[in-house]
Amino acid sequence: MENLKEFDVAAARAIIDAFMIKHGQTDHLPPNSLYVTDDFEELSLRVKPDESATYTTFRLHSHDEDADVEEELTLYTVGVLTQKLLPPFKPKRKYAPFRDSVFKGFRQSVSLHGAGANTMVKAVQAAKYGCVILDRHVAKSTVFPSERVCVDNFLVANPYFETGDDAKGKEKISFPKHVDPFDDLNRMQADGCLHTEDNVVQYLEGFESDEGVFKQTAITPARFRPGDIVRVGFAICVKQDNAHNSTSSELVLVLRSITLIDDTISTTIAMRQLDEPTFAAKKRTTVSRRALANGIVPCSGSRGY
């Protein structure tokens, strides 16, 4: 997982605020989706259970009157990408087929920092509101995960696969070439390990058309870097373990899409990092020369200090 240790908070907030002022309007979003800054509490929300073999997922749905469809509600927020675990998948070892316990842990995930902007404050409030509504429908109480859903660490994830008995009856969807260029993920699919519609994440780049309209195009997930300003689409769910000995339900923010908005900060960070190895090499050379001048000969295989 790639991490971001520090960034220019003021610059990030300025970019986020400018984007929201210009493009933060729900008419640019798909049906049954809106920004967290909109008053979604006024929506007619419904809770739909989706039962699998080992767990039941309770999802927030809304009815779009214009499109006359009822679908899962997708919320959008904008922040600084601080951590990412995204394709292309680079396996360090070859996994045997049907290793459900291993594949179950493979996730596409991102963490966002709000940089003091209102978008992340509202995102946390939306997650709490969704948690309260969904908790009324589950048999086991839901604990709000404040350590991973907060303004400086907003974690959104989605498994690559449905595994084990939960994959039975599900339709397999292949990973597109721009997400899985070497077919590492597609080769893992088999009975008991399927990439389904619910696991699909859209990887996009935003741009402004000649008419000033915000549009998106598909890109490879490899384009994303810590420090990018991104727009993330997510759904709010509660997962209840069907096992009798399970004591609580889990709030889950499901990653649906991630859109690259601005890479100015991440590019600046990358340029600075390119200079660091050169500086370290010069430092090692200086130390080695000083050691030789003092009659100290480095051992074979040492770094010279």
Image (tube, grey):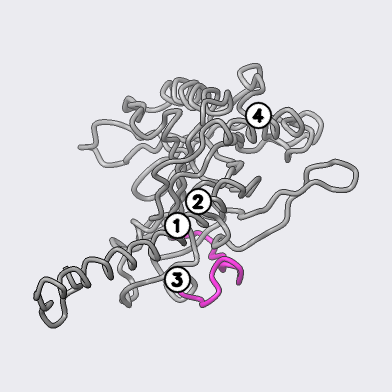
Pointer 2 residue: 269
Mark 1 vs 4: CB contact within 8 A: no
Report the side of 21 relative to 16 (left or right).
Answer: right
Secondary element under disc 1, as helix, strand or loop, is helix
What kind of residue is marked 2?
Ile
The residue lying at 52 percent from left, 23 percent from top is 121
Q: Earlier in the sequence, mark 4 or mark 2?
A: 4
Q: Amino acid at mark 3?
A: Gln
Which secondary structure, mark 2?
helix
Residue 75 spot, x, y in % from top left? 60, 34
Answer with mark 1 or mark 3, whichever residue precedes in sequence.
3
Query: How far is mark 2 from mark 3, CA to CA?
Result: 37 Å
Single out the mark in the foreground, 2 or 3.
Answer: 2
SS assignment at label 3 = loop
User: Mark 1 = which residue?
Assistant: 273
Which of these two is toward me, 115 or 26? 115
